[in-house]
């Protein structure tokens, strides 16, 4: 069997003896079917008919039940890696300020007295 025959067997309807699809489905129809099925709306206008297509849908839904939470967890872990200090500095309030970085064991009073003298 060719790839087309395998894909046809997953679509609603059964292939003929020659391997051609009796009820072929366009890509946008297949996408609609998958979205409606995974969103649990299930309008019923398109349904898997053969045993193989039903099995494929069950496997896709089962895979989705595990894949979406796992990927969501990874995405949340990546978001948690960001710190509020990772972004660029933004001025706020327009008040002048000084950031002093030094060894905490050093007495900064002489520096402050010199810096703020009038």
Image (tube, helix red, strand yellow):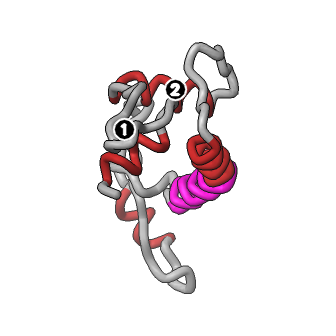
Q: Is residue 109 above or below residue 51?
A: below
Q: Nearer the viewer, residue 10 or 63?
A: 10
Please name which of the two marks, 2 or 1, marks the residue nearer to the observer. 2
Q: Residue at x 58, y 13 (%)?
A: 45
The answer to whether residue 11 of the structure is visible from this angle is: yes
Magenta-drawn stretch contains 80: yes
The answer to whether residue 18 is left or right of residue 13 is left
Number of residues whose C-alpha sits closer than 10 Å to that of mark 1, classed few (under 14), some (14–19) or many (20 or more): few
Q: Which residue is mark 1?
A: 91
Q: Secondary structure at mark 2?
A: helix
Percent coordinates x, y for residue 48 in the rendering: 59, 32
Answer above or below: position of 46 versus 16.
Answer: above
Residue 32 position within the rendered picture, expressed as x and y whole percent measured from the top left: 47, 23
Q: Is residue 80 above or below residue 11?
A: below
Q: What secondary structure predominates along the stretch shown in magenta?
A: helix
User: Residue at 42% of width from left, 57% of height from top?
Assistant: 86
Please state the horizontal and vertical placement of residue 49, each as a whole percent of the image. Answer: 61, 32
Image height of 98 relative to 38, above or below: below
Q: In this orientation, which residue lies closer to the viewer: 91 or 51?
A: 51
Q: Nearer the viewer, residue 97 or 114?
A: 97
Which mark identifies residue 117?
none
Residue 41 percent coordinates (x, y): 67, 20
What residue sits right under mark 2 in the picture? Answer: 33
Element under disc 1:
loop
The residue at the point 55 percent across, 80 percent down is 104
Is disc 2 in contact with disc 1, using a CB cutoff of under 8 Å?
no
Quadrant (top left, top right, bottom left, bottom right) of the N terminus = bottom left
* Residues shaded magenta: 64-81
Q: Residue at x 36, y 64 (%)?
A: 114
């Amino acid at each position: 069997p060719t790839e087309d025959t395998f894909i046809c067997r997953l679509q609603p309807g059964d292939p003929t003896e020659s391997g051609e699809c009796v009820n072929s489905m366009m890509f946008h129809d297949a996408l609609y079917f998958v979205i409606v099925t995974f969103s649990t709306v299930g309008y019923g206008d398109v349904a898997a008919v053969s045993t193989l297509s039903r099995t494929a849908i069950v496997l896709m839904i089962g895979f989705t039940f595990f894949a979406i939470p796992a990927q969501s967890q990874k995405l949340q872990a990546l978001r948690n890696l960001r710190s509020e200090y990772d972004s660029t500095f933004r001025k706020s309030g327009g008040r002048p300020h000084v950031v002093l970085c030094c060894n905490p064991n050093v007495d900064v009073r002489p520096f402050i007295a010199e810096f703020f003298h009038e």
